[in-house]
Amino acid sequence: MDSNIYLPHLMTIEKITQEAPGVKTFRLKFQDGQTASSFSFKAGQFGEYSAFGEGESTFCIASSPTRKGYIECTFREAGKVTSSLARLEEGDTMGFRGPFGNTFPMDQWKGKNLLFIAGGIALPPMRCVIWNSLDTRESFKDITIVYGARSVVDLVYKHELEEWNLREDVRLVTTVDPGGDTPDWKGEVGFVPSVVEKLSPSPENTIAIVCGPPVMIKFTFPVLHKLGFAPENIYTTLENRMKCGVGKCGRCNVGKLYVCKDGPVFTGAQLQELPAEY
Amino acid sequence: MSEFEPKIVAFVCNWCTYAGADLTGTSRMKYASNVKIVRFPCTGRIDFMLLLKAFAEGADGIIVSGCHPNDCHYTSGNFHARRRWVVFRGLLDFMGIDVKRIQFSWVSAAEGAKWAEIVNSTVAAIRELGPYIEYRKAADYLAQQEKEVFNG
Amino acid sequence: MMEKRYISLISLKRWLEKLNNDGKHIYAPVHKGEKIDFGRISSTDEISFDHVQTTQSAKSVAFPRTEVLFSYEKEKHNVRLGNPASDSIPESVVFGLHPCDAAGFDPLSAIFNWDYKDELYNARKEHTTLVSISCTKSDEYCFCTSVNGGPGNTTGSDILLTPVEEGFLAEILTEKGETLMKADETCFEPDRGSVKEDYLVKLPKKFDLKTVQQRLNSAFESPVWKAQSQRCIGCGACAFVCPTCACFDIQEDAHGDKGKRLRCWDSCGFTLFTQHTSGHNPRETQSQRWRQRLLHKFSYMPDRLSVVGCTGCGRCSRACPVDMNLLEHLISLNN
Amino acid sequence: MDELRKKATELLQSGDVQMVIGYEKGTKGPRPCFISVPEEAHKLIFDEQCTGNLAVYLTHKDLIAGQKVAITASYFALRSILRLFTENQLQADRLVVLTVSVDKQLIVFTAVDDIAAYLQSAPVPKREDDAALIARLEAISREERWAFWTEELSKCFKCYACRAACPMCYCNKCIVEENRPQWIQPWASTLANVEWHINRAMHMTGRCSDCGACGAACPLGLPIHLLTRRIVQEVQENFGIGANEAVQKDNVLSTFKPEDKENFIR
């Protein structure tokens, strides 16, 4: 079979970072030199990650396309595949198919303010865009990141959060759910939508990128509308269940759109048109 | 052709049969080496699927063994297991799965000799019956794909 | 390409025997218990000619219910992958399928090729020649004429046979069909000039496809889905017998360090089909899943792939344990 | 039948129930229907053809949606209803159970115990074809039985119509969908199918009404209901518990008697 779309690339796990309880980041390198040099992707795309013997799981590529030579994925141990991925060690082999799906239109965002709003384990898909924009910082104006998790310990990318916090050219607001704070917690306490409302960012020349669990999205969108953000200036990524990643297996569609092909990146305006199948 | 050596998997309870099998060893009793023992807390915990999986993965015979009635460490696990086996055996036989390849027994911690006898006689019986190819053949879906393309 | 010939029943059997002797795998409708279904034949005597419809469609010749995507072997830190070889796919002939089944390969091919090309499907399809037989009877579940088809429709077939008098009018429709005919051309006589339409079953249109599609475009929130799906018990019978349903699952058959990744049939009607690991389910209720099935076939596929996802074979309704009659629902949408 | 329609109208009109689960005329035979307005009660039918087990709908949460419902139950469906009561899946004050006896009398059950009493007194509908096939299978050799079942079950494509049609299969997640560990291979191939059907049958022990809905639902016509029927027989022969009794008792496999048969254990 010359071009078997279900055959994964073999990847070596170069580095494993424990981000939070049950959450790990893998840095992966292509074992095949030719694939490694020809591989390219854009912010927002995802892949199918294989644990051989268990199956595949879908995550966004969490590293920035500006960082060459590797890709990263961050996942929480939840089901069969992710639990088995979590048992792998540095130097082990896993599989990767991708990149799949559409991308954030970062070229169109040049010269604008970027407002990132993320909840829990949804920072990873956004981390790709954040680093992409920080690595090409001159292309954008103000960059604001609002990130919330259930509790302090659940915040992922803690080192990077510190790094962003220290940067002059980034405004970082972190928050944890009420009760999730610790005595020395210096960030906000409250749910992401209410923190955004309090922050009251200006919609002027601003793109909002929202990633989070369905319930967070559901409550954040109205806040953004209230603040005056036009639906076409709000972006999100949908995470419907997928198997094939290539528009065939029939799982991920929302109405007539396939999240794996037409998404995962959608604008608020597109979501208004779509039936609520996500 | 080398002689057929039956592969036997024994599912045994920790408290009686496993201790009994231990006694067989410490008493230096010789018995057939064809058995791989899998230890469970109780016969009540031995799911019938384990037996089917053993056959599918290459076992030619199976021994399931635990405490005698009224001796269960958990009072009634073996009674529950017994009921399950009654129904399971009946169903298997009705489906044509060879129940002669499954030996159920009660072997207490003191019955080292009985364990040796159970293993030896089971090995002999399975040697007589031959490898359980019939069952494993059903597991090979690639060989069947030809036929199954339109069965499916 | 189109050439007309005549073939007598005796010659037809001789031709099939020849194909069989040439090593081709011939699948044809045969008796399986009380049902008629496709099976590989070793003798032409096994073939059933007088049924209305086989239980299953012919799709599994190109999209088998269980298929190896690749194999793997783990060794310490490394993994070796084994790609299925296309030369292991046998040359196959499906004989005696009806036009609705042959037409079903169009939507299937569209799904497997609309963007990424599914070479596994394509390889099987390429190795298959379809010799269809026009319909001389129908039943209350048939509605091919309402979905751009017909009892003598040539779409998808390589050769279409229409029963006339003692033999068949043979329409050789593709190069593949011609090659197959030439395996023993002596079996085929010159066309006797039979008028095909005279021998076909008359099947009036039951609804207007355009109207149904238009209604569906704005019917997402309609209460009709809930009402229609009350009876549905959520099994996958309709999807599995359907000639165009292509939803699949990917599973792992692992044995120690070795294993295979498999593709197997799945159905949008199953509760867990779309359920996330978190438990969240975008299509939580049976009515949402029933709606997905209808909209996918009659709205999304025409829209995205320019092909209707239904050929009117009626199998879903025949197979349904609770008589979810698709035609009845389409007629009610039409009205 | 008129009596049944009258009763259904009355129940809906008085607001005593919000829905009647019954049979209506379908494409070829009777099919399930759901009547929620008295004007539609005339659609209801009930005769010997009405063999599908409507009790399956009683655990469909989207359908029932907290309503009080009435159901027209066949002999076997009554057994299933009893079992669902035993397994605490039904509330007696939210359900009206109706049946039509062999002498065409409408019976409205007022208590769960009345259903049990009716089942004892009414004749068990005969399924002679099944009995004949079981007898034939018992008469042939074990090897021939294996050949029979592997041939039949090799056809199964795992549409799970058998499971969907069964009132006892109300689990949110079926054992076949459990993937940690993957007990049963979820794809369709002979052994994976054999394992699935053994599991299905075993999980029915002492719970099966022997209605045959699983086999009737099978689009491929596989006689899988014989497996559950065989289990019913095993329970009767080995433990002396008949189907009517089993559905009312604690699960056959979660109970035991010290004197249970053990002639096969050494």
Image (tube, coloured by chain):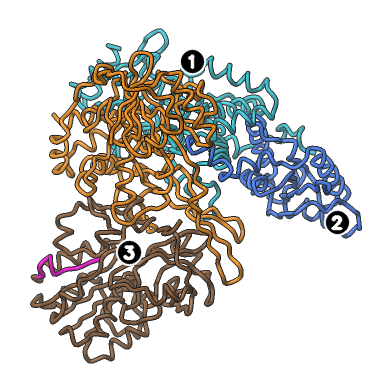
Among the chains pictured, the one given brown colouring is A
- Distance, label 2 to label 1, CA atoms, is 56 Å
Magenta region, residue range: A229-237
Residue drawn at point x = 43 percent, y = 26 percent: C186
Left-right relation of C221 to C91: left
Among the chains pictured, the one given blue colouring is B
Q: Residues within 10 Å of mark 1 (few under 14, many from 20)?
A: few
Of the pair C54 and A16, the residue shown nearer to us: C54
Identify the hue of chain C: orange
Q: Residues within 10 Å of mark 3 (few under 14, many from 20)?
A: many
| Quarter in which the N terminus of chain D is drawn | top left
Q: Nearer the viewer, mark 3 or mark 2?
A: 3
Question: Element at badge 2?
Answer: helix
Q: Residues within 10 Å of mark 2 (few under 14, many from 20)?
A: some
| Quarter in which the C terminus of chain D is drawn | top right
Whether residue A124 is visible, yes or no, is yes
Among the chains pictured, the one given cyan colouring is D
Kindly identify which residue carries mark 1: D125
Q: Is residue C164 above or below residue A7?
A: above
Q: Quadrant of residue D201?
A: top right
The chain carrying label 1 is D
Let me know if marks 3 and 2 both belong to one chain: no
For the residue marked with disc 1, what is the amino acid?
Answer: Pro
Q: Which mark is residue A86?
A: none
For the residue marked with disc 3, what is the amino acid?
Answer: Phe
Q: Nearer the viewer, mark 1 or mark 3?
A: 3
Kindly identify which residue carries mark 2: B23
Q: Position of residue A128 (x, y in %)?
A: 30, 76
Residue drawn at point x = 18 percent, y = 54 percent: A274
Q: Quadrant of residue B24?
A: bottom right
